[in-house]
Structure formats: structure tokens, C-alpha cells
Image (tube, rainbow, N blue to C red):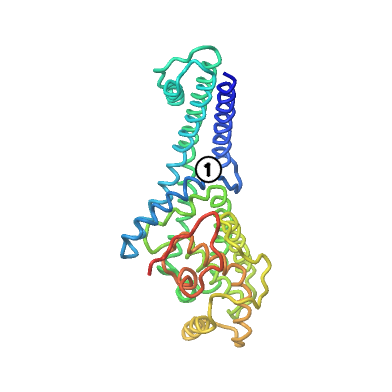
Amino acid sequence: MGAVIVVRVIAFVGGLAVVAWTLLSAVRAVVLPRAAFVRLSRAVFVPISELFRLFLRFTKTWDQRDRVLALYGPIGLLTLPFAWLVLVLSGFTAIYWSLGGRSLRHSLELSGSSIFTFGFAVPGGLAQTLLAFSEAIFGLGLLALLISFLPSIYAAFSRREQLVALLEVRAGNPPSVTQLLKRFYIIHGLDRLSPMFARWEEWFADVEETHTSQPAIVFFRSPLPNRSWLTTAGAVLDSASFVASTLDKPRDAQAELCVRAGYLCLRRIATYFDIPYDADPSPDDPISIERREYDQVYDELAAIGVPLQADRDQAWRAFAGWRVNYDTVLVALAQVIMAPPAPWSSDRLSTHPPQRMPRRFRPWVRDE
């Protein structure tokens, strides 16, 4: 008899702990307006990522891979509230059973009837009635979180993609420093670069907030297969770095502020995924861009008359000094989300893979 009481006490405490942990995880994942590593969310997303990794083995083209990966973020996000409901249902099942008078099956029926407010199972006694009311409230609350959660996710996604789509007009698809600076020079003039960098400074601030407090958005892919928020951000940062280092014009403070906003944004997203980086790199540290690649852009822009610094060596050192602030995190995040091929960002993966894989999320495997 004493052993049975001990088992029921353990079941009650364990069920209560599962319910409390689940509710706390839901609050941290949805309501808390800051970056928070939620183990339950990881436990949901990582197995789904392994399933998608299996599907990727049967794809042959980039478009096929992109169609498969486009479903990862939404499916993971919709699976999360179902995991909450299942855990709460299991926790209350253990609690009902621990109170005695019901078999495990009847406890499960009462828990399911309460959390989904079906009402086909009647609780017995005041304690079970109060627990049934509490479970119904928790069930409705979790569903309400889902209903309010999805619009905020898609609002953040829409804000992110609007500016990404607008940049395609000037920077091409995939975006590149050469195309962006060429088009601005020919169509607008270089003086119009500063307002663009100001808008992207605001964009980086918004992405930092939304993609760390709601990290599932990181995996939401752009509507077009070859478009990506990350590769576009990389093109903007490289363009701002090129302007700050190489253009022969008065100092553009807005370009420098854009670079700072950008690398802070990418670093904080990288921190969530446990991607290592040097927070205070030396300007002389190596970067994934080679000198010949920089020289090629320099020559192409010089050929159309863009005013450039005469001392190319000094300009290269200055560019590398800006790029080193975001080089590591840009390339690593491109692997984590399997970004489409783009110059100076996702195309670095074959020659400059990240030094260490993130522990919290194993990146997609690129099968060449």
C-alpha cells in the first residue's frame, strides 16, 4: 500500500512539473519579447529537421530543395503548439490518476475531455473538477497563443521581405555588390546610397528583434527560390563596406552605421544558434573574400567611371577591416538556413566552411 502511495505521489509531482514546464516554455517561446533558448522548441524542431534532411536526399535540383525547405519553418511552427497540448494532456493524465479512483485510461479520457472542452467525461470530486477547469483554461490559452502568434510571425516576415524584394530591382538576383553600385551610379548617382543604407539600418534593427525573439522566422524562405533575406543582407553589408572603404567620396557615416547595425544583427542571431565568432576581431584577421575577387569588383566599377580610391592596397585593407566584423556569422548562417547561391555569402561554403558546427541546430548538409 505504501509503495502505491509513493508511485501516485511521484505521478502527481511529475505531472505537475510537466504541465508547469510546458506552460513556461510556451510563454518563453511566444510571449517573452527577447531571445530565449527553449529546450522544448529545440526538441520539436530538431527531429523535424532530421526528417527534412532525409527528404533532401531525394532532391536533385536547387528548386526541388527549396520547395522542400520552404515547408520546414511553417511545419515546425505549427507542430510546436500540438506538442504543448500533448504534454499538458499527459501531465494532467498523471495528476488525475495520482488522485485515485480512476484507471489510467479513464484519466486520459478525462484529461482529453477537459483540455479540448468536449465535456464527455465527468470529473469526480471537487479536486478533479477544479483540475478539469484549470486544464480547460490552459488548453484554450494555448490555442489562443497560437491564434495570436501566427499573425505576428507573418507580419514580421512581410516586413522583412518587402525591402528584400525592393533591393532585387537594384542589386539583381542573386544580389551582388557590383550590380548594386553600378545601378546606383548609372540611375541615381552615388549620393542616393545614404538614404538606402538608412532604411537598411532600420531593417537590421527589426530583423534582430524579430529573428531572435521568434527564431522560427529565420527558416521562413523568400517567395522566390533564389531570393534570401540573408544573402540580400550580405550584399547590403558588402556594398556599405565597399562604400566606406573604396569609393573616392566624402565619408559616408550612414554606410558605416549600416555595417555596424548589420553585424550586430547577424551576431545576435548567430548567438542564439550557438555559432562561434570573434566579438572583437582584428582588422588584419583573414576573411572569406579573396583579394582577386575584390580586385574584380574594383575593375568593373572603375571601367564605368565610378570614382574609386587610387591606393587600391589601402582600400582593400579597409574593406577587409569592415568585412571581418560579419564574415564568420554571415557564412555560418548561410549554411544553417541553406541559403541559395549568392556572391560573397552562401558561395563561400565550399571553400570556407564554418570552423565549428552549432550545437543547438545542426545545419543542413549540402549534397553537391
Q: Residue at x 51, y 16 (%)?
A: 129
Q: Which residue has dot 1 on it? A: 40
Q: Is residue 5 left or right of residue 70?
A: right
Note whether residue 14 is visible: yes
**Residue 54 occupies quadrant:** bottom left
Residue 106, image x, y percentages: 43, 20
Residue 105, image x, y percentages: 42, 23
Q: Nearer the viewer, residue 51 or 25?
A: 51
Q: Circle 1 sits in a helix, a strand or a loop, which is it? A: helix
Residue 17, image x, y percentages: 58, 32
Q: Badge 1, how many Cα within 10 Å: few under 14, some, many 20+?
A: some
Note whether residue 184 is visible: no
Residue 56, above or below 174:
above
Residue 365, image x, y percentages: 43, 63
Which quarter of the image is occupied by the N terminus? Answer: top right
Q: Nearer the viewer, residue 321 or 8?
A: 8
Q: Is residue 342 left or right of residue 317?
A: left
Residue 239, above or below 300:
above
Q: What kind of residue is marked 1?
A: Leu
Q: How many marks?
A: 1
Residue 260, above or below 351:
above
Which quarter of the image is occupied by the C terminus? Answer: bottom left
